[in-house]
Amino acid sequence: MANKTLPDDYYQLLEEIQILDFTLVELNLYLDTHPDDLEAIKQFNTYTRKAKELRQQFEERFGPLMHFGHSYSTHPWAWNEPPWPWQV
Amino acid sequence: MWIYEKKLQYPVRVSTCNPMLARFLIEQYGGADGELSAALRYLNQRYSIPDKVIGLLTDIGTEEFAHLEMIATMVYKLTKDATPEQMKEAGLGDHYANHDNALFYHDAAGNPWTASYIQAKGDPIADLYEDIAAEEKARATYQWIINMSDDPFLNEGLSFLREREIVHSQRFREAVELIKDANSQKKIF
């Protein structure tokens, strides 16, 4: 259980990532069936870069979002730290 | 390889403990047209489908797991503070006897998930038409649940999921056209 209260900007930053990621999921599925759309590919690459930057900001404040070498860890091992997605 | 990310695809909020709504929502967790069925159906069909739609099945199948986690989060939040008495009153007494407040893959009526809910025919058109139908059935189920829900926060998340079914259905329809185009080109030679 997550007992620590989270600062407001946890939710803010998380939502910004969720917004960018949603754009990326939509562009991705669209490109799966429209692979020649150069404008959509440009948008996809732009939002991919923005999402990476935002993830890095979030992780510096609130710990790793991903496992298996896709995020860095502080000491002690940060992955086990709550909150898990269903706890916020 | 799959990578987990410690965040939901879309925020999930609920107004209050409501095990009755959780009971209905379980339909989309372990029911025939639920998110588990969807994810397993699409990811399993990938191996025998033409290359040009493998990416789409991979991506939609993966997104379904994100939706499964959203449903799980909704059910968890709606039931985590429920007493055994409240579970019983909500019609979840049978569930509680077997699982306490744990989640389990069954439908709203308590039937456990079964692989007979999904199909892989090895025929791309048959498989994609099944996928379109699955998305439309899931969209309808979300609507029926929203019709019974009086929780505006929960309905925000459910509306998002309902919209995703529409987008997935559209992409699968486009995939059918891609396969048909490829088939008709073959006949020329």
Image: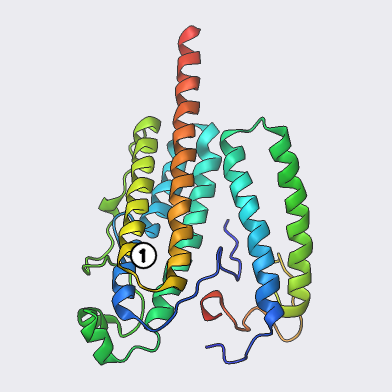
How many marks the image carries: the answer is 1
Coordinates of residue B138 in the picture (x, y in percent): 35, 53
Q: Can I make out residue B185 in this image?
A: yes
Query: Is B25 above or below relative to B20?
Result: above
Colour scheme: rainbow
Q: Residue at 65%, 85% (x, y): give it.
A: A6
- The residue closer to the viewer here, B178 or B55, is B178
Question: What chain letter is assigned to the residue under label 1?
Answer: B
Question: In the image, residue A64 lies at what x, y percent?
Answer: 69, 74
Image location of residue B189, percent across then percent down: 50, 7
- Who is closer to the viewer here, B13 or B26? B13
The answer to whether residue A68 is visible is no
Q: Which residue does the numbered mark 1 point to in the structure image?
A: B29
Res. B113 image quadrant: bottom left
Count residues near mark 1 (Cα–Cα under 10 Å), then give few for <14, some for 14-19, many for 20+: many
Residue B19 sits above or below residue B181 on the image: below
- Numbered disc 1: secondary structure: helix
Q: Is residue B178 left or right of residue B33?
A: right
Above/below status of A39 relative to A87:
above
| Quadrant location, the N terminus of chain B | bottom right
B16 relative to A8 in the view: left or right: left
